[in-house]
Image (cartoon, rainbow, N blue to C red):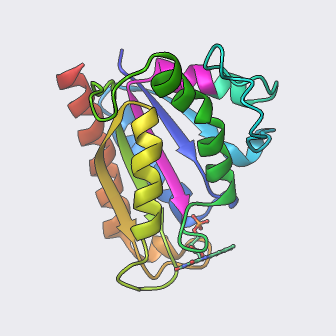
Amino acid sequence: MKKILAIYGSPRRQGNTTLLLNHAVQGALDTGAQVEKIVLRDLQMSPCLEIYGCKETGRCVIQDDFQEVYDQLLACRGVMLASPIFFYTVSAHTKILMDRCQSLWVKKYSIDKIPYGQWKPERKGLFISVGATRGKRLFEGTLLTLKYFFDILDAELWKALLYRELDFEGDVLKHQEYLQEAYEAGKDFALALRAEY
Ligand SMILES: Cc1cc2nc3c(=O)[nH]c(=O)nc-3n(C[C@H](O)[C@H](O)[C@H](O)COP(=O)(O)O)c2cc1C
């Protein structure tokens, strides 16, 4: 079974990225995939304290809900991550998760000494994001952050669904075509995982 982790990064419970990710999850489930959901706003997760307690083992020493997420990240083959754009990057909830994964950076590059760029993809990633404005560069910062986050997860970015001009909770419901696209992407994502791993 190719397990997919669906990570909800918005502080809103029924926000635009949540609705889109729900559709992607449904698409994956409809292929028979196994999906685990993580709603970041429901977790107790400290930001990275930069104490490098992870330097011996590659495991973070802060005892909070990240410990379980760490295991889930390593166990999955697909990551679906959804975050709104906040100040041209991901939400604070999402960024806290990313920063805690510095422990995986330590494991990969400092402990296991993998030469940069020479890793084998172990998982695939589907990224979903929305912003309120329509600037050409709206997703640039986020995509750069995501690139390095996926790098430490040994994940290749399979697809990014990026939508502009969605602001209020539920705005995406006026765009059934976006929700349909997310559903199809979730389905194709699960099928791509099945074909590859
Ligand atoms: C703290 C904060 C910062 C934001 N920064 C941006 C921004 O830089 N650019 C933008 O287009 N929208 C920005 N927005 C708007 C959100 O991206 C937008 O409301 C989005 O639809 C929220 O997605 P969600 O419903 O999934 O949480 C910001 C909203 C908040 C609350």
Name the side, left or right, on which 93 lies relative to 173: right
Instruction: Reply above or below: 97 against 135.
Output: above
Q: Where is residue 126 in the image (x, y as percent from the top left)?
A: 36, 46
Identify which residue, 54 or 84, lies in the foreground: 54
Task: Answer with the quarter of the image where residue 191 lies.
Answer: top left
Report how many numbered discs are placed on residues in the image.
Answer: 0
* 47 in relation to 167, above or below: above
Q: Quadrant of the N terminus?
A: top left
53 vs 34, left or right, is right
Start-end of magenta stretch: 70-84
As for residue 108 lying within the magenta part, the answer is no
Residue drawn at point x = 76 percent, y = 30 percent: 65
Q: Which residue is drawn at 56% across and 27% down?
A: 106
- Image side of residue 114 versus residue 58, left or right: left
Q: Is residue 73 magenta?
A: yes
Residue ID at (34%, 28%): 123
Q: Quadrant of the C terminus?
A: top left
Nearest the viewer among 38 and 22 is 38
Observer-nearest of 109 and 100: 109
Residue 31 occupies quadrant: top left
Q: Is residue 151 left or right of residue 192?
A: right
Residue 162, percent across and down? 37, 66
Residue 160: give x, y in percent of width and height.
Answer: 33, 56
